[in-house]
């Protein structure tokens, strides 16, 4: 029978460690594996294996290429497979800046499926600092938490992904006011994900998770985006329209849009690119715009069988007789959002009816970004 595996992620080391210790204490026979990536830029990783009695083994692991992918492939997965026959629960205690999705998909592989079953993905959060950290614009290297040489990711960017992907979130630390604020923030960022106190962790030894379904919760085409909401000063605003966006006007508005909110994401389309779904992802003033593939309306009907049921369902919910599933669906979250001003700014970026009738060719300042990524 396969051994259950739970991943515990989180930028906040003490909260993550406390969660792992709780799991070890609550599941006799469980074993935790942790890789310290503090020296990963030198190709050196420190591996620790422990149970509830303490450390069982420590070793330095040298990698051909210092990165998270190498660590998982060359050491974590083999260690989990080695420990599986004698463990009741395996806990992958992830390094601070590791995003859980890549590890989850590595564990849920054909090679290990008979021995391991992924049963939970948790992110542990320090309630005392999480609401502030989601607004921080420093790179990981600036705060001493890179996961590889040349890691250019931002702290808030990684934290957002650690919050939005897992099956459950765990709050640790802070006082009652901190925990109340953290719950309010998380209710906006990940409204469908359960939040647990450190004293009441969720079950982690059940049926295997489907990583394809976990991915669909965050992929642009199928993401379960938040709805309009307000909790005290925290506001989430949904902006939905059908007309295409003017690439020049949207490009000029980007800086203002991302600084008006703490977190924004969604899918959109530009005039001049009617066949391509574009993904918008911004946090703490840092924005990414990427090509997320074709709209279903741009594909021949025979190709629909090649996409997932979740993708087809999302398209059907957005379907319009004239434009198909092409839609502007962006969600903005932040304190005291001026929703009227934000909506007005976005509305002004839409192509006017006159511009649509004229059909003029528009300059696209997004082209250097989108075309380069498409080629790559």
Image (tube, rainbow, N blue to C red):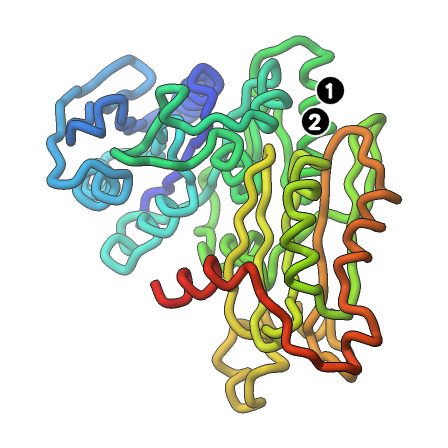
Category of crowding for the residue at label 2, using alpha-carbon neighbours closer than 10 angstroms: few (below 14), some (14–19), many (at least 20) = many
Which quadrant of the view contains residue 183? top right
- What residue is pinned by disc 1? 180
Q: Residue furthest top?
A: 175
Q: Residue at x 59, y 37 (%)?
A: 283
Seen from the viewer's position, the closer of residues 151 and 123 is 151
Q: Secondary structure at mark 2?
A: helix
Above or below 206: residue 62: above
Q: CA distance from mark 2 to mark 1?
A: 5 Å
- Considering every residue shown, the one lying at the far right of the view is 340
Q: Where in the figure is residue 84, as x and y percent of width and height? A: 25, 40
Horizontally, is 204 left or right of 244 in the view? Answer: left
In this picture, residue 237 sits left or right of residue 207: right
Q: Quadrant of the C terminus?
A: bottom left
Badge 1 density bin: few <14, some 14–19, many ≥20, Cα 10 Å: few
Q: Residue shown at 78%/59% (left/top)?
A: 240
The x, y position of residue 97, in whole percent, is 40, 30
Residue 192: quarter of image:
top right
Front position in the image: 113 or 268: 268
The x and y percentages for residue 323 are 73, 79
| Image point (38%, 35%), residue name | 98
Closer-to-camera residue (348/312): 348
Q: Residue at x 29, y 13 (%)?
A: 53
Would you identify the image quadrant in which residue 319 lies? Answer: bottom right
Q: Secondary structure at mark 1?
A: helix
Task: Report if the CB atoms under discs 2 and 1 are less than 8 Å apart.
Answer: yes
Say if 218 sits above or below 26 in the image: below
Residue 52 vertical placement versus 311 (above, below): above
Could you tell me residue 87's position as x and y percent?
Answer: 28, 34
Residue underneath mark 2:
183
């Amino acid at each position: 029978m396969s051994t259950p595996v739970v991943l515990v992620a989180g930028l906040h080391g003490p909260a993550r460690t406390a969660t792992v210790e709780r799991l070890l204490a609550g599941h006799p026979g469980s074993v935790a594996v942790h890789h310290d990536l503090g020296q990963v830029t030198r190709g050196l990783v420190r591996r620790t294996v422990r149970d509830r009695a303490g450390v069982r083994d420590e070793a330095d692991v040298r990698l051909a290429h210092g990165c998270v992918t190498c660590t998982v492939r060359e050491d974590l997965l083999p260690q989990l497979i080695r420990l599986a026959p004698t463990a009741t629960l395996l806990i992958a205690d992830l390094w601070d800046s590791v995003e859980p999705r890549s590890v989850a998909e590595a564990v849920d592989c054909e090679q290990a499926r008979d021995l391991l079953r992924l049963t939970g993905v948790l992110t542990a959060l320090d309630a005392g600092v999480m609401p502030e950290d989601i607004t921080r614009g420093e790179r990981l290297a600036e705060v001493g938490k890179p996961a590889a040489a040349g890691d250019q990711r931002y702290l808030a960017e990684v934290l957002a992904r650690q919050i939005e992907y897992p099956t459950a979130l765990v709050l640790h630390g802070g006082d009652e006011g901190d925990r109340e604020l953290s719950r309010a923030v998380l209710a906006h960022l990940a409204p469908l994900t359960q939040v647990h106190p450190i004293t009441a962790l969720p079950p982690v030894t059940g049926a295997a998770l489907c990583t394809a379904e976990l991915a669909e919760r965050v992929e642009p085409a199928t993401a379960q985006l938040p709805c309009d909401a307000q909790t005290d000063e925290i506001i989430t605003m949904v902006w939905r329209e059908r007309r295409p966006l003017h690439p020049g006007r949207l490009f000029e508005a980007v800086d203002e849009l991302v600084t008006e909110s703490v977190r924004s994401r969604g899918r959109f389309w530009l005039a001049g690119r009617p066949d391509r779904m574009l993904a918008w992802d911004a946090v703490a003033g840092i924005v990414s715009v990427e090509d997320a593939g074709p709209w279903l309306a741009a594909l021949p009907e025979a190709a629909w069988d090649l996409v997932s049921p979740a993708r087809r369902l999302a398209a059907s919910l957005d379907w319009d007789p004239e434009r198909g599933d092409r839609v502007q669906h962006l969600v903005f979250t932040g304190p005291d959002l001026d929703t009227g001003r934000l909506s007005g700014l976005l509305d002004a970026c839409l192509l006017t009816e006159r511009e649509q009738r004229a059909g003029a060719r528009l300059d696209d300042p997004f082209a250097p970004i989108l075309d380069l990524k498409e080629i790559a």
